[in-house]
Image (cartoon, rainbow, N blue to C red):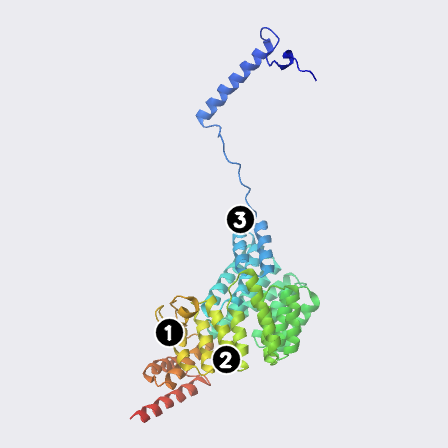
Amino acid sequence: MNLSQDRLTFRSRQNGSSPYRVLLWVVLILAGLWFYVQIDAGAVAVFTPTPTPTRTGFSWAQEGQALFAAGNLDEAINAYLEAIKADPENGALRAELAQIQVYSSAVLTTDEQRAARLQEALAQADRAVELAPQDSKAHAIRAFALDWNANSELVTPEEREDLLFDAQQEATTAIQLDAQNALALAYLAEVQLDQFQWNLALQTIETAVARDPSLMDVYRVYGLVLESLGRYRDAIAAYQKAAEIAPNMTFLYISIGQNFRQLERYEQALEYFDLAASINERLGIQDPLPFIAIAKTYARQGEFFIASRNAERALEFDPQNPVVYGQLGTIYVQARNYETALPVLKCAVYGCTAEENEVAQTLTGEGVAVEGLPLTSIDVAYYYVRYASVLAALNKCEQAYPVMEDLMAAYGDDAVIPEIVAENYAICRILAEESQ
């Protein structure tokens, strides 16, 4: 196309101005003046960011369920806490949070940590039934929270009895509200088991399985009841079914491994403990429990070197946890490595400073202060027993006497501990006589 000079010009060929164009300019000028006045008066905000949509409680809850299904319980709890911030009057959200909080207590290692988490769960469950008094699931989960609180090592026998009574009442209420609620039946069976009603618990959980075999909770409780009856093979099958439904719940694999260990099928037990550790590694969770379970399994087979390495790995994950020191010290004792066991057990029972904690320095590269375990449960008592026994065996009786006095004050009525304490006193007496 030939572009002439006329075609290249941008100047209008018309002479003069159109009256319509003049009118347009007048309108634009007046509009600009009005806009300026509005800005000056603050009526119009300029360059205001576009409002960010607020996430709903339902959105956060969906994320929490996905995290729970993935096995990331702490992050699931955080998501549900955000859901409740967005929708604080929603009882169903609080019930679901309580359920996850109860399960998360299973992967905590100290009595104090578990008790604190279970109290948080019960508080949420209490509020859930206040907000949704006709919600069968909310009552069922409150029964669940009450039952697990009853099994805390830090409650008295009287408190345990009261909690179990309330749990039974809550589960019964849930069933009255919805007779088809298999979750409520499962939790009722768990309560009955803790009330030593073994046959009734078995009947109840079998009804729950028949009612809804799609629930992880149903098969978890079924496994627990069967395990309590000594039916370890059947318990393994039930736990495995639960794990098929919820494949990232590491506490299920720990239960499967423990039942294989009861059957002395150690290779299978180690496979499941290792599976739990692998899931945690994939999720970036540094949980010492699978490694403690592995360590106990090797120790039972007399393979104390491998056992100690796994217990040390657990300590690397959680170097402030006195329970891990107790487990490691116990393995050292079983291996008759008393000198090494002594400072580790001290960290477990009475605590140690960062300077005293040589094992943490060796394993993690820095000393870590550890707060000792209060003498509040029979499991903890045996760490004290081992510490006292090692002190006596190494002729450090002046240090052993206060430990044994603490044991007798707390567990003087126990069937076994006073006998061990008496043996340690006898050892100290013999060593004192030999040194004269």
Discs 1, 3 touching: Cβ within 8 Å: no
Residue 294 found in image quarter? bottom right
Q: Residue at x 60, y 53 (%)?
A: 62
Q: Which mark's residue is nearer the viewer, 1 or 2?
A: 2
Q: Mark 1 or 3, which is nearer the eye?
A: 1
Across and down, in percent, residue 435 comes to 31, 91
Q: Secondary structure at mark 3?
A: helix
Give amino acid for label 2: Phe
Question: Quadrant location of residue 358?
Answer: bottom left
Residue assigned mark 3: 86
C-beta proximity under 8 Å, tags 1 and 2: no
Left or right: 342 as drawn, with respect to 159 = left
User: Marks 3 and 2, how far apart in space?
Assistant: 52 Å
Label located before the other in sequence (3 or 2): 3
The kind of secondary structure element at disc 1 is loop
Q: Residue furthest left?
A: 436
Q: Looking at the image, is mark 1 or mark 3 earlier in the sequence? A: 3
Checking the image for residue 350, the label placed there is 1
Could you tell me which quadrant the N terminus lies in? Answer: top right
